Image (spheres, rainbow, N blue to C red):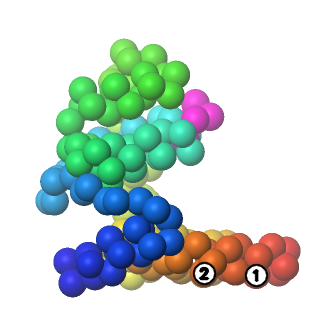
Amino acid sequence: MAGRPRLYATARENYGLELNQGPFGIDSRPALIGAKYAEQQGVGPAYHAAVMRAYWLEAKSIEELDLLADVAVSIGLPRAAFLAALTDPTLEQAVLEDIAWAQTNGLNGVPALVFQQKYLVSGAQPYDVLTRLVEQVRAEG
């Protein structure tokens, strides 16, 4: 929570966004399982962006299944199939493996971006920091 003012300032100053965060302490696992399904369907980035918008800009609770289904429909996924996927044990296992990997590698907060399984960008960072890192990763080929 100590970094929250910095996060809000970075979003405002570097990206022109006024954050309006959703509730703290929610269970984001359904949203994560939904992300796995969306990735399988080829719309992972669109789903991720829509869920982030709902939580960080619209202050919505991303643990609510109806909200997640609405997000899925908004990016072209069928509601019933999406809701069924949220109880798919294979997708849940994939999320649990991601969580275990993050914990093993010392990641315990968001945002956290990992590039090439080598570089970690933790916390809200200015756009130019991310751009430089992407250019470095590309140069390393």
Q: Using the image, tell me which numbered label, if any, was put on residue 129.
A: 2
Secondary structure state at the residue bearing disc 1: helix
When the figure is inspected, residue 106 is found, relative to residue 95, above or below; the finding is below
Query: In the figure, is residue 138 to the left or right of 133?
Result: right
Q: Using the image, tell me which numbered label, if any, was put on residue 118.
A: none
Amino acid found under the numbered disc labelled 1: Gln
Residue depicted at 85% across the width and 74% down the height = 141
What is the x, y in percent for residue 137? 75, 77
Quadrant into which the N terminus falls: bottom left
Residue 37 seen in this snapshot: yes
Q: Earlier in the sequence, mark 2 or mark 1?
A: 2
Residue depicted at 84% across the width and 79% down the height = 139
* Quadrant of residue 140 within the rendered picture: bottom right
43 part of magenta stretch? yes
Q: Using the image, tell me which numbered label, if any, was put on residue 136.
A: 1
Count neighbours of disc 2 (C-alpha within 10 A) and say few if under 14, some if 14 to 19, many if 20 or more.
few
When the figure is inspected, residue 137 is found, relative to residue 88, above or below; the finding is below
Q: Real-space Cα distance between discs 2 and 1?
A: 11 Å
* Quadrant of residue 78 within the rendered picture: top left
Residue depicted at 50% across the width and 35% down the height = 38
Secondary structure state at the residue bearing disc 2: helix
When the figure is inspected, residue 49 is found, relative to residue 100, above or below; the finding is above
The secondary structure that dominates the magenta segment is loop
Which label sits in the foreground, 2 or 1?
A: 2
Q: Which residues are magenta?
A: 40-44
